Image (tube, grey):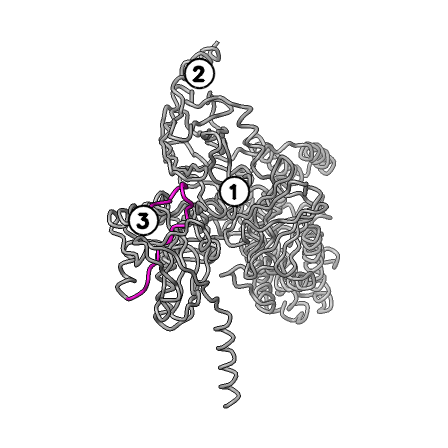
Amino acid sequence: MKIKVLFLMLSLSIVSASELAAPSFQLMNQNGENIELDSFKGKKVILEWTNHDCPFVQRHYETSNMQSLQEKYTEEGVIWLSIISSAVGKQGYVSPDEAIELTNARSAKPSHVLFDTSGKVGKMYKAKTTPHMYIIDENQKLQYQGAIDNMGRTGALFNTDLSKAKNYVVAAMNDLANGLSVQESKTRPYGCSIKY
Amino acid sequence: MRYLVFIFLAATYVAETSSARTDHAEISIIGKENLIQEPGTYKFGYKFTFTPGWHTYWVNPGDSGGPPTFTYKNPKGWVINKNTWPGPSKIEYPPLMTYGYENEVVFPFEITFDNLADANTEIDIKFLVCDDICIPEETTLKLTLTKNILNVTQKIEELTKWEAQVPIRAPPDLEIRRTDNAFTLLSDAITENSYFFPFDDQVFDYSDPQENINKALSFSVYEDFDKPLSGVVLSDAYYFEINQPTSEIEVAAVESISILTAILFALIGGLILNLMPCVLPVIALKGLSLVKSASDSKTSVTINAGAYVVGVIITFMIIAFTLVTLKNAGELIGWGYQLQSPFVVTILAGLIFAIGVYLITDLNIGSSLGKFEKFANGSGPVNSMMTGALSVIVASPCTAPFMGAALGAALIQPDAYSYLIFFFLALGFALPYFLIALFPSLVNRLPKPGKWMESLKQLFGFMMFGAAIWLLWVLANQVDANSILFVLIGWLLLAFIAWLFIIKIKHAILIGVLIGCAYGYQLFNWDFKQQTVTQSNDSISWSLDLERELKTNGDAYFINYTAAWCITCKVNEGIAFTDEIFNLFEENNITYLKADWTNRDPEIAQQIEKYNRSGIPLYIYWSKKLDEPMVLNEILTESYLREVINEN
């Protein structure tokens, strides 16, 4: 019996060790405040790499797909960080004021919009596309990274109905809420390249 | 003169070509010709010219982007086939790697015209055009056929150039090796600029480098990558396609039957074969001769029946040996393949017809044919053995539809198992006589000889004619009308020769042999022209590219692997594929694809092998809800199809 428990604990520790720690970072938000990932310990955090001029991102905002996710999870106490890694002058780059305007115009509900003009954080997370989604759990472990849903390639752009898609973020959040390990913890992101 | 008028018309209609301009691209349809003078398949291409430096994507775009989509409806009498994908270039935006076409591209496609009446259709084209940034654009091209002129721009060279970029079959020396997480492709066709572009999404990190040393291209893949490798390889100025055979990879949903089950099926199947319309008469003939010999000694009955069993088994083993040898030589074959050769079908049909004639006439009484009579009716062990061999040969067309699963299992197993399964098939086939050989007294239980035997024989003759008609129909699906005429003349001659014997004309044998030789010579030199396959409008003919593209786009599909010579297929098509089912296909946006295996087609054979089958019917269904394509039952009913589609 004791051996069994020991074995169970051992295997549990192996499992948790295999989960990636989310690299910590601090970035400026739309109000000029410094936002640190470490300060959100004990809460779930969702990262959304975005670029408002990218047609794939536009598609998810025009269909209110992204906003409804932001609303749903921020209401549950999850921290939603929309990160813009576009370099100054490149597509998707906006000033803090423009970011606030965009958020209002699109009725977006992120906890913060963060500016990563140097691309440091994006590259640290190996963010490739917009959108590119990450879920970080209460212990700051990376639980999901990848596409927002399974409408990859031009599916998200040219398909009229996005509701049929399987949303990976929702699936992963449900797994976590049910105390399960995330079934699909890594998928291939799709969209526009990030304009580092 | 008429031709000149056409050319003149062509020139005037060029003004109204199918082209359009968007913000960053100019799109047009180009063709090898724009004069559609007779029904047939013509080659075209969607041509994109982008703002310099801009690009669009291949079917697998790599890290970002997506391929163009083409949406259209076929006008009556037209079948617009899906476009093919020329091999892509690497377009690098570190840290991203994408696959696509810079500055310009032509996506070749074909249209089959069954009907040349004036018609038009619209093709909606949606695509992403990108440099640093991406812009989705769309346009609609109108394709119009007016007085045999299609409004496309004639650009032969350009179309030919891009057609040459469409991947071709992999070179025969290609070797695919996998060690842990790395693949190595070995071939003389690997050149300095070679690069592997995968079709599937979850193969490797696109930006990972590929190593290319000395005719060997290596790259690592994800640890959990467990699918067959498929994609295209750049080789100098052209591309070839790789489709790793799936023999060592499990195909989901296919239950490979255990060896014991296969043996049991083979035994039962063999036994059932005795009842086939093309076999029963031959076997019954042997039975009748046994009835006659009931008075003979038991040993003689045993020897005769035993010889027949041996004949059957030897013939089956020869077939097994041929199949296994071909399989090991890398030939892709499947059961039923023998009916893909018009020559073989002609011979079999002739043989069956001749047996029919023999059965309904009183030829066997004619003394001039004493030897022949002895052969089929006679009682020597050699003759019995020959009858065994004959019945296996005559049975071969009938085995295909019924033995698919067992023979499929047989050919995919190691050689020893293949022989074992064929052995049991032979044993099952010979079982009735095997029992008689073991228990000769069984013969006494058969009814007493009498006039009924003659009537029964004649009845069997009509069964043979039925089987011959079926084979002729198979042939009619493969060859042109002249060849059918030629075969029927052969039948006429056969009947004529039979009549010569019946009226006991002098030198009947000599005349028969002469006619036989003359006809045989013609047959050997006959050029069986393959019929051009005409497509019906409700189905699209299958191609691997098309299937892959549908799957990539998440579009559901149903593939019907069929052939004219496959009876079960035809029965299924008649019973299960009702109008309601086709409506159901349409409602659920399921593309119905037909893979016609009436004639030899290595690509289809390869697919059938992939699903662990060696024969047809084979039905494959896939929709987004399924991870892997689903292999349906061999026997279909409408309700079963409905269930499959509604539940998946």
Q: Can see residue B163?
A: yes
The correct choice, above or below, for B263 with respect to B358 in the image is below
Query: Most extreme residue toward the top, as rendered?
Result: B1
Q: Residues within 10 Å of mark 3 (few under 14, many from 20)?
A: some
Nearest to the observer: residue B373 or residue B175:
B175
Mainly helix, strand or loop, the magenta region?
A: loop
| Span highlighted in magenta in the image | A77-95
Give the labeled residue for mark 2.
B10
Quadrant in the picture for residue B271: bottom right
Query: Most extreme residue toward the bottom, as rendered?
Result: A1
Give the labeled residue for mark 1.
B99
Q: Can see residue B452?
A: no
Q: What subunit carries mark 1?
A: B
Q: Position of residue A35 (x, y in %)?
A: 36, 60
Give the labeled residue for mark 3.
A96
Q: Position of residue B345 (x, y in %)?
A: 61, 42
